[in-house]
Image: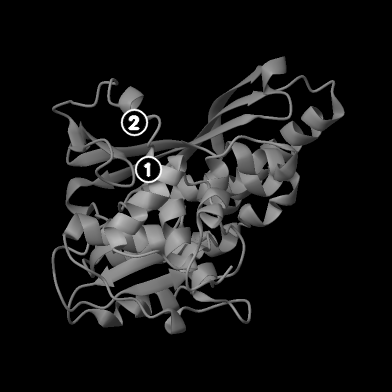
Amino acid sequence: MEKDVVSLEDALEHGLTKEEFQKIQEILGRIPNSTELGIFSAMWSEHCSYKNSILKLKTLPTTSDKLLAKAGEENAGAMDIGDGLAVVFKIESHNHPTAVEPYQGAATGVGGIMRDIFTMGARPIVSLNSLRFGNPDEPKNKYLLSRAVKGIGDYGNSLGIAVSGGELFIDECFSKNPLVNAMTVGVVRHDQMASATTGGQVGNSVYIVGATTGRDGIHGASFASKDLSKESESKRSAVQVGDPFMEKLLMEASLEAIQKGLLVGIQDMGAAGISCATSEMSAKGKTGMKIDLDLVPFRETGMNAYEAMLSESQERMLVVPKKGKNRNSYQYSKNGI
């Protein structure tokens, strides 16, 4: 989809409401083009913004004198465990992708949660999960469960991080509509923790490192925020495709760059891809960010701005090296990235 000017119908197809479309026009002072509409759709989705659940989430306990990263402050939570060490942890769902393509849907859920951990400088040490599926006596439920479990195990095992625990509940209410929650726990020294920020600095370079960018996962965040329907079977392009061996290389290179103090900030490129990663790093650092999409390494030909900004191709990071440390890209190239 590439349009200079979009309509309310286009906005509704992107999962936005009439009121939200009007708000976008107020912000921009004009009607958005198709790329801008796609970005707003992704960033204002439930998956990225928690716009519907935030009031409930705010009722949960979020304070402790052990906290090193507050809720929502970084890619994952971090708590002091003594001796200069911190435990870093996060849990996240990959429900809709698993319902549509169970192997890749569950596998990329694990991959994404791993990146959230090592983006903070922590080495993942354990993978966990909490699963809800329908009765496996029904063929579709059996297929979803078996393929999801294999996807979870294969991705973690390829990284050398095995599943060490979890839970499984079976109930008819989850028939053909499973819940798949992946969790990863890592350990890091306090003085080696990284942040997803530009650091408030101006003039630094910004790099995408890791896998190339394709058309897989476009609208993944928006898709994950919608109710499942018969149309979901046609949304396989919204399910990301994982490469755990690339993730292993990316993890080792990122941890080395962080430990050597070469980076101002680093951010996982997960939901909403370039759109979300650049926005979150800029917002945290209270700076702007200029990006040149012509420099994005694409794996498919003819990709336009809309596709580039919304691709959720896996195993990618956004890094901001310290001034004079641009050669930190060597840390990635020597690891095969």
State whether residue 57 is above or below residue 117: above
State whether residue 29 is above or below residue 185: below
On the picture, is 22 further left or further right than 205?
Answer: right
Picture coordinates of residue 34, whole percent (x, y) = 49, 66
On the picture, is 311 further left or further right than 87?
Answer: right
Q: Are marks 2 and 1 in contact (CB under 8 Å)?
A: yes
Are there few (<14), some (14-19), or many (20+) residues within 10 Å of tag 1? few
Q: Secondary structure at mark 2?
A: helix
Q: Is residue 213 visible?
A: yes
Q: Which residue is mark 2?
A: 54
In terms of sequence position, does the residue under pointer 2 or pointer 1 come before the other? 1
State whether residue 79 is above or below residue 3: above
For badge 1, the amino acid type reads Ser
Disc number placed over residue 49 in the picture, else none: 1
Picture coordinates of residue 90, whole percent (x, y) = 39, 37
- Picture residue at 34% right of the left edge, 31% below the top: 54
Q: Secondary structure at mark 1?
A: helix
* Residue in front for this viewpoint, 332 or 70: 70
- Picture residue at 23% right of the left edge, 70% below the top: 262
Picture coordinates of residue 125, whole percent (x, y) = 43, 42
